[in-house]
Structure formats: structure tokens, C-alpha cells
Amino acid sequence: MHKRSFRNRKLYGCGNATWGLCGCRQSCKLFYRADPLKIVRAVGQYMYDEKGGQYLDCINNVAHVGHCQPDVVKAACDQLAVLNTNNRFLHDNLVICARKLTSLMPAPLSICFFVNSGSEANDLALRLARSHTKNHDIITLDHAYHGHLTSLISISPYKFNLPGGSGKAEWVHVASCPDVYRGKYRAVDYPGQDMGKMYADEVLDICKKARGGGHTIAAFIAESLQSCGGQIIPPDNYLRNVYRYVREAGGVCIADEVQVGFGRVGKHWWAFQLQGEDIVPDIVTVGKPMGNGHPVAAVITTLEIAQSFKESGIEYFNTYGGNPVSCAVAIAVMDVLERQRLREHATRVGNHLLNSLRQLALKHLIIGDVRGVGLFIGIELVEDRENRIPATAKAQHIVSRMKEEYILVSSDGPDRNVLKLKPPLVFCQENADHFVKILDEVLTEMNDDEVTMEAGSPQRQKKANHPEFENSPNEKKIKIDDQQSEKIIKV
């Protein structure tokens, strides 16, 4: 296998002669650190390195409607050629974008604030919640991640619980992640029980204890589907009960849709709607997919909450939030989603992929759980299915091996044993079949001990030197045969 061109490291980082000594490398995360990728272009669901290698992108939930989508690119270029300024001035794009975005939300979510990132959106959501309720404390979920600002690190156990983290602040209350596979309450241990209410009742207890300790609840914030926490799908009735408990305690409910919004779940525009059409947050934050890679995000809330914020006397101003180019891009993304029926596509391809992975789980015992909806899927790897011990090291090996096979996938969760799939929504059935085929091959080689866990093993080098290895496998046509199709589990 060819080596990546990061040998000449003085070309990267901050210009230091030795990139490895630059503070950027130590402070910032780099995927595939041992053998980094230099990506130079991308189209649709594919990314290309400087050698022309084609990689199937299974992780880029930012390029929501596909890398370099022509209509989105044209909208950005056309508007950039005419005007790009801050939002001190009137512009039609801002109004059109706000109207379009709020039209996709359930009533009474009708007021839109534009920002530049999901982190800014969640930070503003906290300000709105506190201004409206006049309360301060926040309830968050274990393993949650809501952004990189100081205010958000404080409510993100995914960050503040790290060895170098600051730990939990007194005004932060952490509820258990509603993981019914390997969480505090497992469905296998409580057959027939209402798991949603069981997990929600912990939030009720938090509200009671907070009140008893002289604390006031401003908000409950949660990703509608927890991503960094391990691709968690909350059980039925979870949000219905949590939202009721929090509102009774004087707080508001914030749905973080930064990673899972804009139709990724297929059936609905927003993941919180999976819990029922009657489930309506008080504040919704959106970001990443909204601009297909362009920095644009938003907070959508009610007129009542917006009015409370206005009456606080602290106006909100964001220099570039809602600028003409950002709004043009967001409008184009929503138009492409509707015109190309990508929600329906995500449902169809996602169901096929889930079915295929569940079939694969019958063959490979390391696959403990397959869960997901639309093109938001998690594959939890375990050492044994009885005790559900996380297969962390094997998960990292699989991520590395999949990259060697020109497929980009990542792992996450508290034990980094969950393979995450959040590809661009143009990801097709052929891509799904190819992913499952290669994953099957990688798991089989692990089972057969054909290679060691070291990427540079003699066996691996022998395979790398095969004449077909340099060709991108994504160019091959992969199909599930009729016999396999009949075995696929129906959902």
C-alpha cells in the first residue's frame, strides 16, 4: 500500500520546520494519526486523496446532500459574486431562509436566530432558556457533546469527564444516557417494561432533588439521537415523559439537532419527531448539515421565549449569522433535499443497510447490536454477547482496516466500540452493499487470524502487494445475490 504524502510535514501545520513539534498536532485531533489522509477533492459520497485514491465516505454528516453538490455550489458562488456582508442590512435571503426553515418545524416553533455553528446555536439556546425561565441549572445526558465553547463543555460529559477535564459544575445535572443495550437499564433485564419511562424517571428524580437543594432548572438539553455517545436511539416515551417533568419543574426543553436534523432519519425532518408528532421542544438547534459544509446554523424557538429574551435588554447580534451567502446556501440545501426526495432515499437505503447488518450479525458474534434509523446507524462491537464487554481495540483495528480498503468510518461511544455511520444522504444501496461486503471480509480475516492486529504485518503487506489492491474497490459493482436477499431480516 502506498504511503501518504505527509512525510514532508514542514508543508503542514503552522509552518514549523518539523510539523510534529507544532502545538497544533498535540492539541488538535487528527483522524488516522498513524497514517493520515490528505484529501484534495470530493464528489457526492466519495472523497479523493492526492494519489487519486477514491474513498467511500460513511462518516461525513456535514456534506449532507453530497460533497460539492452542484446546486449548492452555484447558490454560494452566485450570491458571493453579488453581495456578501454582515447582517446589519435587510436582505431577501434571510427572510426566505427563515420562513423555509420554520415551515419545516411543528408549531409553535416560529422564531429563527441565525448563527455560524452548532456550538453558537447551543450557546444561544442556553441564553434563551435562562432569560425565559429566570432559572440557571441545566440537565444534560451522560456522554453528551454539545459543542466546543466553554459554556457547552460544561454541559458535555463527553468532554468534562476526560482526565484533563474540569469535571461537573454544581449547576449541571447529569442523567443517564437512555441506552437500552448496554446502559444503566438494559431491555434484556426488563422485558416488557416501559424503558422510556424508566430512564425518564431519573430526570424526574433530578428535578426533585434540585428543587430540594435550592436549585432551579432552566433547561433539559439532549441530542434527539445521541451521536458521540454511541449512536443511541432513545426508547419510546422517553422524551414525552422527560419534557413533561422538566416543564413541571419550570424549565424548557432543548432539542439538539445539530448532527441528526434535516431528514437524516428519513421518516421526519427532525429526529425528535420519531418520539411522536406530539413531541415539540421549546428550542431546537440546527447546524452541520444546514450548509452542506458551509458554516451556517440556527436556533428556532417560540414567540414567547423570543419575547422574554428581548425583554432582558441584552440584544442578540451576530456579525455573519444570516449573511446573504450563508442563507443562499441553506436555502439551496433544503431545496435539494425536497427536490431529490432525499428523506425517502435515506429511509429506503437505511432500512436496507440495517437489514444487511443484522444479517451479518448472525455470522459474526462480535456484532452485539445494530441500531439506527434512516442513515444514522451504529454497530456496537462486543467481546461476548452475554456480558457485552466492549471490543474497543478491535473496533479501532476495524476502523483502520476499513480505511485501507478505501472506506472511511469512525468509532465512538464511551468505550469507542461503536462503529458510526452518518454518510451523505446520497449514499446509495450499492454503497451499502459494498460497505457490508468489506466489513464482512475484515471481520472474517480477524476471525481466521489471517492478519495480526498490526497494520504492517507480513500478511497485510502480502495482500497490499496484490495487483488489484491499488484499485479503488468502490469502482467495483457489489450486489447481494438472490439467496442472501431472501435471508435479509425485514424491519
Image (cartoon, grey):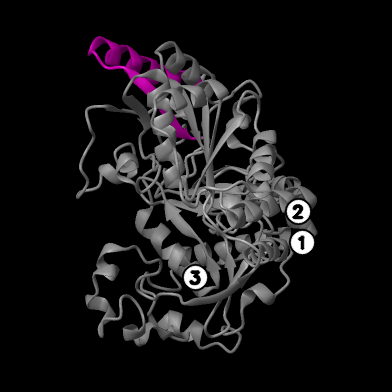
Query: Dot 3 corresponds to which residue?
Result: 403
Residue at (45, 63) in percent of width and height: 398
The location of residue 289, given as percent across then percent down, is 58, 51
> Of the residues shown, which amino acid type is indicated by label 1?
Asp
- How far is disc 1 from disc 3 in space, using C-alphas? 25 Å
Q: Mark 3 falls on what kind of element?
A: helix
The location of residue 265, given as percent across then percent down, is 63, 42
User: Could you tell me if the residues under marks 1 and 2 are in contact, i.e. CB atoms within 8 Å?
Assistant: yes
Nearer to us in this view, 11 or 142: 11
Query: Is residue 258 visible to us here?
Result: yes
User: Does residue 243 sit above or below 380 in this rendering?
Assistant: above
Earlier along the polypeptide chain: callout 3 or callout 2?
A: 3
Asked if the magenta segment contains residue 214, the reply would be yes
* Prevailing secondary structure of the magenta residues: helix
Residue at (60, 57) in percent of width and height: 325
Q: Which residues are magenta?
A: 196-223
User: Does residue 66 sit above or below 327 in this rendering?
Assistant: below
Query: Dot 1 corresponds to which residue?
Result: 481
> Of the residues shown, which amino acid type is indicated by label 2?
Ser
Neighbour tally class for label 1: few under 14, some 14-19, many 20 plus, Cα within 10 Å: few
Image quadrant in which you'd find residue 262: top right
The location of residue 345, given as percent across then percent down, is 74, 50
Neighbour tally class for label 2: few under 14, some 14-19, many 20 plus, Cα within 10 Å: some
Mark identifier at residue 485: 2
**Farthest residue, direction front:** 89
